[in-house]
Image (cartoon, rainbow, N blue to C red):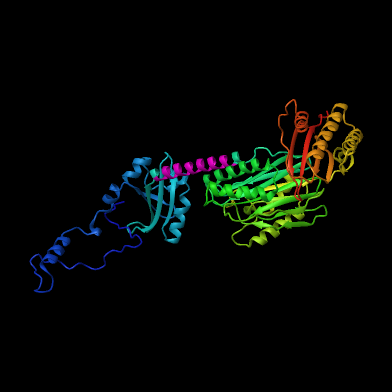
Amino acid sequence: MNFTRWSARLPGTQRRAAARTEDSPTALPSEGSVPAARAERLSDAALLPAVDELPVREVLDRIPALVALVQGPDHRLAYVNDAYVAAFGVRPAGEPARVALPELAEIGLLPLLDQVLRSSKPRTVKSRKAPGGRSYTFTCTPVEVSATPEGSGVLIFAADVTDHAEAAERLRASERRQRETAVTLQRSLLPQELEEPDDLRVAATYHPGGTEAAVGGDWYDVITLGGGRTALVIGDVMGRGVRAAAVMGQLRTAVRAYARLDLPPHEVLQLLDGLAMEIDANQIATCAYAVHDPNEGRLVYASAGHLPILVRDESGTVLRADEPTGPPLGTGGWMHASGSIPLGPGSTAVLYTDGLVERRDADLDEGIASLERALAGATGTPQVVCDRLVRSAGVTADHDDDVAVLVLQHPARTGPDSELFRNAALELLGGVEAAPRARAFASGVLTSWRFPTDLHDLGVLAASELVANSLQHGTPPMRLRLRRTDRRLIVEVTDGDDHLPRRRRAEPADESGRGIAIVATIASNWGSRRTPGGGKAVWCEFALPRTT
């Protein structure tokens, strides 16, 4: 085809329809009509060749971009420029595009040619990788070819964007690596394995939000406090990214340290509040900290701006622990308070972060109410309940916020299993008969629980020493409590004095100071804590031999 005989009528351009008025080289502008300098510029412009007079083929051959022209319904090849030939080789003219231009067929461009021909509207596809590894952006434009019987065709213009595509791929790879690093950091700061309390069954899950690197600062933990008690914590650091994850790690570590002090929940949050301000005054976090004591059948908790704990009792009724709730950690100037909610045998409790219930198009209370309904019908193991709650909330891989969920159950044990979990308590009124009564009571209980002789004797000795310590340093009321689980024997003595004992080295001449040292030597673990109504509890544990 002779490209000097046709012109491409591209959208937005029109040919000049009128003949130009011949310029007279000798004609001078009338006086006062055009300034001399302007007339000189107009005269120079008139000598430049018009766009319509440029040879089309010469222009297209020199374009560094790839250009091809196809015509008719079969898209028969009419022309390819030199750049196209250099990229893909010589192409046979007159053949359909599926034969003459196999590279276009391979990247799926042929259907686009049909659309352009039918609609007479240009179409563009961005950054398609062609055979040979180069990437191009293809623009297909309808044209009218006046010198051919078909009269219509498609001009294919391909700009090489390989550098841009490779830069974009490097950026995406970098973002993926950053996200993997952030998620790895986040997961490494979470507990790799949850501690397994004697009386509770727990499970947790964490879902990082979205596909970007900016993961959040959600965290959870389960901490066995000793004496059969268990601390449970969940929190959320505001903001996203590695900084939020780092702050989360510091707070989680601090929670574990404060938990070892066996403080009431509100005192733990009070310490965390001050620490959060020291870490970063601009970083705010929410947190809920709860302690379960199987002897009380309740969950004692404190909340720093966190969402309410939900508890489903044995009958299926869901309770919401709304109050008391203080401001988030890091705000300062607030005295937190503890509350409690029943958690008896057969109950299930759920602690969660806002990513599970908060949606941009719905009220937060609606999300919590929806979670309550899902919890009411969720049965099975804690992990099954955890997964069902996540699915019911519609959490997917591209969820826009992090989600952390912690589920705990207090199983209702019946049959032979119930024989492995026993309690016995004795009220001590003081006086010289208290110590013999405590030894006799402990001996009788441990005998009825069929403990081996060596464990029986150690339990009686520990009970005797703890009661003697309470009689000497404590005040009434006093109580001895024995508890067994499937893993350990727990001996605990409470009294009305809040002075906590400590282990110390007794000199040979000292008449006291050896009781706690003896208990710490013979027991697997021991500790003390202040009780809510005033007073203290001192306890010790003995690991039971594993049954085969």
Q: Residue at x 79, y 57 (%)?
A: 317
Residue 492 shown left or right of residue 164 in the figure: right
SS assignment for the magenta stretch, majority: helix
Q: Horizontally, is 274 left or right of 422 in the view?
A: left
Q: Is 124 placed left or right of 236 in the picture? A: left
Can you see residue 291? yes
Image location (x, y in percent) of residue 46: 16, 62
Magenta region includes residue 185? yes
Q: Position of residue 380 (x, y in %)?
A: 78, 47
Which image quadrant is residue 328 in?
A: bottom right
Between 486 and 271, which is closer to the camera in this rendering? 271
Give the side of residue 547 with respect to residue 143, left or right.
Answer: right
- Across and down, in percent, residue 8 comes to 32, 58
Task: Please state, as top left, top right, bottom left or bottom right, where the C terminus lies in the image.
Answer: top right
Figure check: 22 above or below 267: below
Foreground residue among 447 and 535:
535
Find the residue positioned furthest to the front.
509
Residue 30 against residue 454 in the figure, above or below: below
Is 309 included in the stretch rendered in magenta? no
Counting labels gives: 0
Q: Is residue 402 visible in this depiction of the protein?
A: no
**Pick the front one: 209 or 24:** 209
Residue 52: x and y, percent?
A: 25, 59
Q: Which residues are magenta?
A: 164-186
At horizontal 54% and vertical 47% (from top left) the residue drawn is: 278
Q: Quadrant of residue 545?
A: top right
